[in-house]
Structures are given as C-alpha cells and as structure tokens.
Amino acid sequence: MTLYGVGLGPGEADLLTVRGREVLERADVVYSPGRLSRSVATEHVPDSRIGDLDFPMTRDEDELRAAWREAAAEIAPRAREGTAAFVTLGDPNVYSTFGHLRRTLSAFHPDVDVEVVPGVSAVTAFTTALGVEVAAGSSLALREAARGAAPTGPDRMVLFKVTDVPATHEKLEAAGYDVVYGRRLYMEQGETVVTDEPDELADRDYYTLAYAERRDLDSELPATAAFESEGRVTDGPKVTSSEHSDAAGTDVERQEIAESEACGDVALGSGVAVDGLGSALRRRRSR
C-alpha cells in the first residue's frame, strides 16, 4: 500500500486541508515525530491510531541517521500492509522532517510507495498573519536566522528560526532593512505575537519568523494600488505582547525546541505589501 506524508499546516486544527483530513481518517496508523504535530493530529484521529516516534535530543549526525533508520524500519511494514501516514507541521517538503524519512525509506525500503499531501506553510501563510502582499514580479528569499544570525543581500526575505530577535534585529536594521516579526502564527499552542518591536520578543522561541525588506526599496506598484487611500493599512490579527521570561524559556518551550531541532523540523506556520512594507511600518509607528 502507501505511506502518506501529510502536512498539518501551521498548527490550528482547522487549517488542515480537506485531502489531508481524508487521508488521516482512513489511515491505519498515523505517525508523529513530536508533541506539537501529535496535538494537531489528535484533533482528527483517535489516540489509538497514533504512532509516536522517538528521536534523540542531539545534533550528532550518526545518532540521527540511526534514529531515522529505526523509524523507517517501524513504518515500512505498516505501509506495506495497509495505509500509513506521517504528519508534520507546515508542508512535508518545506523545512520538514519528512524529507529525512523519505530518503531513508528510498535507501532501505525502496518497495514502499510514498505520496505527499501538501499543507499550508509559512512560506505562504505568513503573508496573511503579517499583512504582507507578495505582488506579482516580486522576488522573495528564504533564509534561516537562528542564534542571532542576520542574513543580508536579497531585497526581501522571510527568515525562519529567529531565536534571538534583538540580536537579529540590530544587525538587519544596521544593514538597512525594515523588519516585522511573527511568533507562533496560527498555532493553538502558545501566544501569537505580531510586532515590529524586537523588545517584545526578547525571550527565545523557536517558532518565530520575520519578514525583512530593504528600507526605501523602489518597487513598481500594481495598478490597483491607486485605489488605496494613502493612510490605509489593512489590519492583521490582533497584536499582543508576550510576557518576557528568562532567555531559555519554560521547560515546555525547551522541550519543543529540542524535539524540533533533533528532527530537523520547523513549524512553518504563518503571516504591508511586499511593495510597501517600509511605509506601512512607518505608518504603524506613527499611530
């Protein structure tokens, strides 16, 4: 039969696609690589059909390869006998654990058929949460910004794993970028925060992304931009400030980060027009 890699979307149970839900409902077993993906999956299938997989909390590549071989050895017989699913947050082919499993199955269990059911990922959904419109003809680069990193170069970037917002922000601002951040976007676990103030995100959280655009970028506006009044900014989701904790976060947060980094997973969960972020941020600050 078949193993399905199913993208759960960013974290809210009702953002799972119709096809994804149908696959989970008919699967004999649904494998989950971590707590967050499991919590979403159990909104659609009973606990009795969830198969949990254990991964070492390490970055040692030999240990991780061994863990993926064990996972593949467990999953392959179930996929041969019936229908199995492996769930990930976001989309299975975008910054996801599923690529590790697919490569391992291909190498050691090539007879297992694999299909992918796409899910909503932050590559697209961040635009809604952050109020960003990626207009036709715009270029957009994806970069990782863990541990205070601040990639530069492209005019517009989506940054994932922004675990040290103040450090990243300082470098990006000095390099001439306007930046807006989103934390735990479209996730039911934890507080959602959308802000352009780095101090509001001083505590570390793996599930933080940013949209950065070069300041005063000269972009060609779409024809219908003329319809918008000069002072109008489309409101996004309610912006809240998170209470600051110690830099390491709570025990639960530390465990979530450890699970995600061990698996290589990223919750690609969610999001001023790409042709106007800087002006919109300036309008927001002036209110």
Image: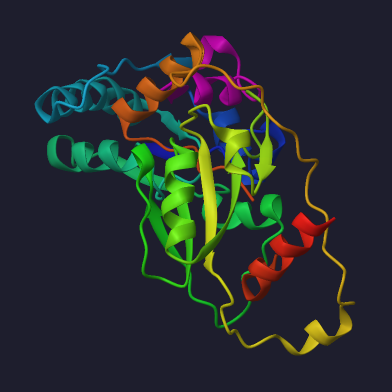
**Which residue is pictured at 38% across the width and 55% down the height?**
143
For residue 143, side relative to residue 132 (left or right) = left
**Could you tell me how many numbered marks the image carries?**
0
* Residue 93 vertical position relative to residue 208 in the rendered view, above or below: below
Residue 46 in magenta? yes
Give how far across and how far down residue 85 sits, in percent: 44, 31
The C terminus lies in which quarter of the figure?
Answer: bottom right
Q: Residue furthest left?
A: 62
Q: At 53% from the left edge and 9% from the top edge, which residue is drawn?
A: 48
Please, is residue 206 above or below residue 127 in the view?
Answer: above
Percent x, y of residue 126: 61, 52
In depth, the one of 26 and 21 nearer the eye is 21
Q: Which residues are magenta?
A: 29-49
Say which of 88 and 83 sits in front.
88
Residue 45 on the magenta span? yes
Is residue 264 left or right of 215 when viewed as pictured?
A: left
In the image, is residue 279 above or below residue 194? Answer: below
Rendered image coloring scheme: rainbow
The answer to which image quadrant residue 235 occupies is bottom right
Query: Residue 1, position in %: x, y?
Result: 37, 36
**From the viewer's perspective, is 15 left or right of 232?**
left
Asked whether 70 or 175 is in front, the reply is 175
Q: Where does residue 266 sit, x and y in percent of width and height?
A: 43, 38
* Up-down relation of residue 112 to residue 188 (above or below): below
